[in-house]
Amino acid sequence: MSEARKIGLALGSGSARGWAHIGVIQGLREEGIPIDMVCGTSIGAIVGGAHAAGALDQLDAWVRELSWSDIIGFMDVMFPRSGLIEGEKIIKFFRENFADPNIEDLPIPFAAVATDLMSGSELWLQKGSLMDAMRASMSMPGIFVPCKRETQWLVDGGLVNPVPVSLCRAMGAEIVIAVNLNSDLIGKRRAARRRRSDKKNANKDSINRQNGTGGLREQLTGYINSTVKRGKSFIPEWFGLENSDRDPSLFEVMATATNIMQDRITRQRLAGDPPDILITPRLAHIGLLEYNKAADAIREGRHALDLNLPLLKDVIGR
């Protein structure tokens, strides 16, 4: 028998949708398909790094328990300097609850993609602290404060290489499995919100007609209740953690604009250097910071892998 070809896994950027990477990796593991090396951008670096360090199951158990209040707790929101979120709370939690080995000591070869803010260069982080590499790779401009590394300021690798197929090949992969999280994203989420909002308003009008409400007292009571509710939900709405028919927040404008750009860059990069297998989970229903929907994302990731398994097994000769 000929020697098995090395298989590389390229995990793309996509904020909260990145938990789908867990489902993909778990599926590969259950099918007995080895991952000889893994590289990731942004959230792909988080999941890929956890897998390379042997902590994927621990990460899976943790993300499934996340609530939106937990997410808000990790956000050290600051007066805008070079980003809205410092990001140190997240990394501090990971350092305390997960190991922080050097990348070169990991049992599975790993690399993360970051972008040099000053030069625009693509950087491949393959040495040093795993947590520092994760922090640099996930630093979405305008949202997270850039990560300082010696004389460089590093930001999200998705600006230059959202799905790092080229990095996988440079690391020696002969077969590259890539996961693109943004293939069905642009324009769909807000349209879905609008449909849900229209349906909700129609149901509310129907109930009001049935109950004969609409008098001054009922209107005043409804206004007060809605104002109180609005106040309680301000933070999750501002960060896009709950669906609503409001105008997009500053956070959503910046993050969505970045995703649009990354979608266009992804198309160009994949056209020039296509992977052997491209997995595209359907994740338009999951918002940018809805990290509390991990179970849905993981399930979608596994489903997307299952759809591609026949082709993948044919490519690797099984």
Image (cartoon, grey):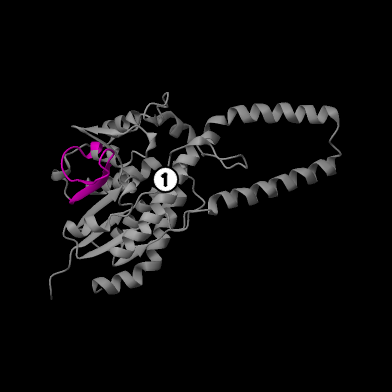
Magenta stretch containing residue 121, yes or no?
A: yes
Q: Secondary structure at mark 1?
A: helix
Q: Which residues are magenta?
A: 108-132
Is residue 26 visible in the rendered structure shown here? yes
Judging depth in this view, the residue of 158 and 21 nearest the camera is 158
Q: Is 297 placed left or right of 243 in the picture?
A: left
What kind of residue is marked 1? Answer: Thr
Taking 44 as reference, is 199 left or right? right
Q: Position of residue 30 (x, y in %)?
A: 31, 60
Front residue (pair 230, 84): 84
Mark 1 Cα within 10 Å, few/some/many (few <14, many 20+)? some
Q: Which residue is denoted by mark 1 in the rendering?
A: 258
Q: Is residue 197 above or below residue 177?
A: above
Q: Quadrant of the N terminus?
A: bottom left
The residue sitting at 42% across, 61% down in the picture is: 303
Residue at the (34%, 45%) spot, across then down: 43
Q: Residue at x 55, y 40 (%)?
A: 248
Residue 134 placed where, x, y %?
28, 40
Q: Where is the C terminus found, in terms of image quarters?
A: bottom left
Report the number of discs. Answer: 1
Residue 247 against residue 276 in the figure, above or below: above
Q: Residue furthest front?
A: 119
Residue 37 colored magenta?
Answer: no
| Quarter of the view holding residue 65 | top left
Is residue 288 visible in the rendered image? The answer is no
x, y percent for residue 210: 84, 44
> Could you tell me residue 46's position as x and y percent?
31, 44
Residue at far top of view: 79
117 relative to 202, above or below: above
